[in-house]
Image (cartoon, rainbow, N blue to C red):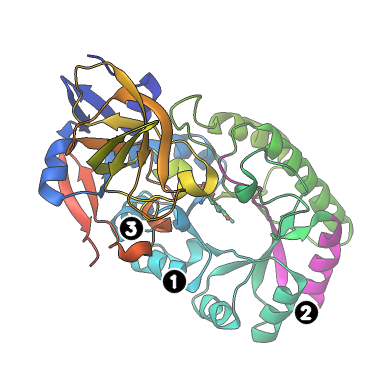
Amino acid sequence: MCCVVPERTRMNSNLIYQGSDLMLDRLPLATIAREYGTPVYVYSASSIRGQVTRLMQSLGTIGSLRYAVKANANPTLLALIFNMGLGADTVSRGEIQEALDAGCPADRIVFSGVGKTQEELTFALDHGIFINAESEEELATIARLRTGVHVGIRINPGIDAHTHRYVTTGTEESKFGIPVDAAPDAFRLAMDAGLVPDTISCHIGSQITSLEPYRKSLARLLELRDSLMGNGISVSTLDVGGGFAINYGEGADFAVEDLQALLRRDVPQGMKLWFEPGRYIVGHAGTLVTRVLYRKRYTRTFVVVDAGMNDLIRPALYQSHHAILPITQRDSGPTPCDIVGPVCESADCFDRDISIPLPEQGDLLAICDTGAYGWSMSSTYNGRPLLPEVLIDDGEPVLIRERGR
Ligand code: LLP
């Protein structure tokens, strides 16, 4: 065969060639494309279960997991994840409702976000949802609506997570949370207003590859906890946030076991821990299947496919890399080409200069590791319908979302 799938892609996304056909969980993706049309998102239930199990066996032994719904809010996937015992991290009334509808108990839902409306706060309070407040004014607003409620306060520890600047959330440049220096006053303000601020929460970014930023931010949170204790404010819970990286074809997934060891070592006994992973759970599970519409061979070679940046915006927005694999391998030499979508924007490009055997018109391609922030960030830009989603569970494909109109 002329095209070899990188070992890690095979290992993590459940994609493997059988002969010249690319299979997801033993089903040929070409069959799925024939049955459901393209473009289409296809997910592997076993990949999600595998990632959740790894998290449960590491972080789940020292704290509780709340899935970040924003990564992928398909109702069937949410139900699968909540059935495994996870709670939810949400950022809007809509996400809270989605979590409740998919069977997540209210007392396992956290409501974060820098701009919650009064209506959203009221909805959360009425449903007994735990709120992580992100500013003094938000705390005051919550206290006006209800007193006596337990709340978290999101701290911005001033730590660079060394990730893309759009997904870095723990530095001074970032709008999120309350700077650690201002945090003691915010806790005092919350107490004086009649709230019970018993949780320090933090989320320093996304697609974080190393332990170091967590180590640094944990040190700041524990310092804060000690100083609050000295002032008679007791903190029962640390919400460490999410951000655990997955490999998009090279390197490894974030070592959750190392984070577990760090927390076991440094966090005082009796302190509750929460984690909010999103990407780590669903990222590898998704494959975007797209069909080649046209080839254009001039100075550059363009392969125009039927999926666009409205279906998967990550490459255009974050210059992120997703491996692209032929669904049926061709026995010809690799040709450098750009894989582009049909949207009227030059940013509508999934990858540049990739070396694959030049696909024919009508061939299928798989864009890998697109389960997180793929469908959930899609739009109908250019009048394009939202994509259908198919779940492969136990060897059976099931349509879990219809194609939009
Ligand atoms: N908790 C909070 C408060 C968050 O804001 C986020 C993500 C998470 C947890 C989950 O982070 P994760 O474990 O998925 O990294 N659209 C971007 C990622 C944006 C993440 C926003 N917040 C991307 O496609 O890379």
Q: Is residue 103 visible?
A: no
SS for dot 3: loop
Mark with earlier residue (2, 1): 1
CA gap, disc 2 to disc 1?
Answer: 28 Å
Residue 380 found in image quarter: bottom left
Which tag is nearer the camera, tag 2 or tag 1? Answer: 1
- Kind of residue at disc 3: Asn
Q: Residues within 10 Å of mark 1 (few under 14, many from 20)?
A: few
Of residues 327 and 280, the one nearer the viewer is: 327
- Kind of residue at disc 2: Ala
- Kind of residue at disc 1: Gly
Q: Is mark 3 within 8 Å of ligand 1?
A: no
SS for dot 1: helix
**How many circles with numbers are drawn on the protein?**
3
Q: Is mark 1 within 8 Å of ligand 1?
A: no
Q: Is residue 320 visible?
A: yes
Q: How far across and how far down the image is residue 178, in percent? A: 76, 61
Which range is magenta? 181-207
Residue at the spot 24% in from the left edge and 49% down from the top edge:
39
Q: Is residue 124 magenta?
A: no
Q: Which residue is mark 3?
A: 74
Asked whether, in this view, residue 394 is left or right of residue 230, the answer is left
Say the numbered circle drawn on residue 279: none
Q: How far across and how far down the image is residue 345, in percent? A: 43, 53
Say the numbered circle drawn on residue 94: 1
Of residues 102 and 296, the one nearer the viewer is: 296
Q: Which residue is mark 2?
A: 193
Of residues 290 and 70, the one nearer the viewer is: 290
Seen in the picture, residue 101 relative to 398 is either above or below; the reply is below
Asked whether, in this view, residue 320 is left or right of residue 390, the answer is right
Residue at the spot 41% in from the left edge and 71% down from the top edge:
97
Mark with earlier residue (3, 1): 3
